[in-house]
């Protein structure tokens, strides 16, 4: 009278081995997402900490020109 001794599952429910694998994969994906998030934060922090010149070489050249010009004028009239 017992029709089938195999485990039957509902349509919305996966067998236990497949559902366990899916759960493990979801945990791994979650861990990787957290690691990627931390790596993005680290990259942003590295970008902020890199030394960037405050004064560009062009502005240094222009400032140097005006200093030399001022010294020349002072030297001529003094």
Image (tube, rainbow, N blue to C red):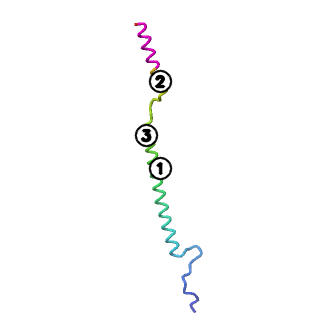
Tell me the magenta residue range. Answer: 65-77
Residue 49 is a magenta residue: no
What residue is drawn where x is 44% and y is 33%?
53
- Up/down of 64 relative to 32, above or below: above
- Up/down of 8 relative to 39, above or below: below
Tell me the number on the disc at residue 40.
1
Report, in whole angstroms, how far the alpha carbon at label 3 lies from the one at label 1. 16 Å
Residue furthest to the left in view is 78
Q: Quadrant of the N terminus?
A: bottom right
- Up/down of 39 relative to 54, above or below: below
What residue is drawn where x is 49% and y is 68%?
23
Which tag, 1 or 2, sits closer to the chain's start? 1
What residue is drawn where x is 44% and y is 11%?
73
Disc 3 element: loop
Circle 3 crowding by C-alpha within 10 Å: few under 14, some 14–19, many from 20: few
Which residue bears the numbered disc 3?
Answer: 50
Front-lying residue, 76 or 46? 76
Report, in whole angstroms, how far the alpha carbon at label 2 lies from the one at label 3. 24 Å
Task: Give the label, 1 or 2, closer to the camera.
Answer: 2
């Amino acid at each position: 009278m017992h029709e089938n001794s195999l485990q039957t599952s509902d349509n919305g429910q996966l067998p236990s081995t497949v559902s366990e694998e899916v759960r493990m994969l979801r945990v791994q994906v979650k861990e990787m997402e957290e690691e990627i998030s931390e790596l993005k934060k680290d990259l942003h922090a590295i970008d902020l900490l890199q030394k960037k010149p405050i004064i560009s070489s062009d502005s240094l050249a222009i400032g140097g020109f005006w200093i030399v010009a001022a010294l020349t004028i002072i030297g001529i009239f003094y």
